[in-house]
Amino acid sequence: MADRGKNLRIDAARLWQSLMEMAQIGATAKGGVNRLALTDLDRKARQLFTRWCEDAGCTVSHDAMGNIFARRPGRDDTLPPVVTGSHLDSQPTGGKYDGAYGVLAGLEVVRALNDADFQTEAPIEIVVWTNEEGSRFAPAMVGSGTFAGVFALADSLAITDADGLTMGQELARIGYDGKGCGGREIGAYFEAHIEQGPILEAAGKPVGVVTGAQGQRWYEINLTGQESHAGPTPMAVRRDALVGAAAIVLAVNRIGHEFQPGACATTGMIVSRPNSRNVIPGAVFLTVDLRHPDDARLAAMDKALRDAAKAAADANGLELAMEQIWSFDATPFDTQCVAAVRGAAQDAGLAHMDIVSGAGHDAIYMAGVAPAAMIFVPCKDGISHNEIESATPEDIAAGGQVLLQAMLERAGGS
Ligand SMILES: [Zn+2]
């Protein structure tokens, strides 16, 4: 019985065709996709997905956050479902694969099960999470986060876009305001996604077995010195805030290199005041983003940053105000779900490697309420959130096949 499941194959051409068809909704001239959350184009994508799922025999519903669930019943339909999916919204200059791949790989799993007349023991569900990107409505991953209880429903519905429209209003406008969100048992959650980084491509492996997500800490730093004339002020008496900031920028980069493997450390934003060519900068604002898959190592990076910032301030006679404004603990995925992904790749004879997610994904919130894991496939040059985002049909198919087998491992059936 289990053997019959292992022999099932997805239809690679059909999966690719569906991806290309979905990418026509909001297609941009440069070959990408512009499909912001809860726009008319998002509605069109949702409707196409719904039609495909209904054609595949699924029952389709949505919740109060507009998260869509397409359900293929199990032999024992009282079992908690094995769920897969991702998102259909995009960045304004997004690509064809980010999100849509995970959704349509899930659809292909259902279609392949239908073709083989295979009945799973537990029900299968494909989910489309609302507003994963966080581009039109911040923060990101708010549909899955609300489902997982990270955000309160009322707060999420009240989030506004730049024009002051709320998510609640826009959900109602496009016909995706439903009832309730979350609070039901999920047997397992799998998500297929492009890597959005260069590691798999460089290693020549079509499948990444995602073991978890990095912890993150975000900081805002204000350095205050003394503005004064760039000519008459001798070097010895200066309190140059930008020189202190420069020392911090270099320290952040050094910390990133020192805490390998796995560390990332970035100064992404810097504002110098008054930003005038003949004035010694009196105040600088900068942001720091530290990431590591191991919370203890991340805490050590935090200490190294604080020490470096204090040393930079002291050396330049500056006042230092430093605040950690956001943090996210490292999220290890469920060991059994990760093993199911690894085993599926092995069984399919696909080269694979363990990898840690550097970006946020719906699966990370889902890991808080269900056993979860992810499957990565390479994308060209590691580029994503860009219209030139690209992946090969072979790699797209590899991830879909692994998804099918990993889901069957958890859902059972014959
Ligand atoms: Zn995504």
Image (spheres, grey):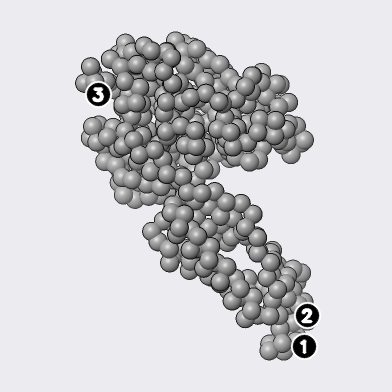
The kind of secondary structure element at disc 3 is helix
Q: Do labels 3 and 2 touch, CB within 8 Å?
A: no
| 307 and 286: which is toward the camera | 307
Q: Do labels 1 and 2 touch, CB within 8 Å?
A: yes
* Cα–Cα gap, marks 1 and 2: 8 Å
As drawn, the label of residue 228 is: 2
| Residue that label 1 marks | 232
Q: Quadrant of the C terminus?
A: top left
At horizontal 50% and vertical 60% (from top left) the residue drawn is 299
* Cα–Cα gap, marks 3 and 1: 79 Å
What type is the residue that disc 3 sits on?
Answer: Lys
Q: Nearer the viewer, mark 1 or mark 2?
A: 2
What type is the residue that disc 2 sits on?
Answer: Ser
The kind of secondary structure element at disc 1 is loop
Q: Position of residue 330 (x, y in %)?
A: 47, 49
The kind of secondary structure element at disc 2 is strand
Q: Position of residue 102 (x, y in %)?
A: 45, 31
At horizontal 72% and vertical 72% (from top left) the residue drawn is 224
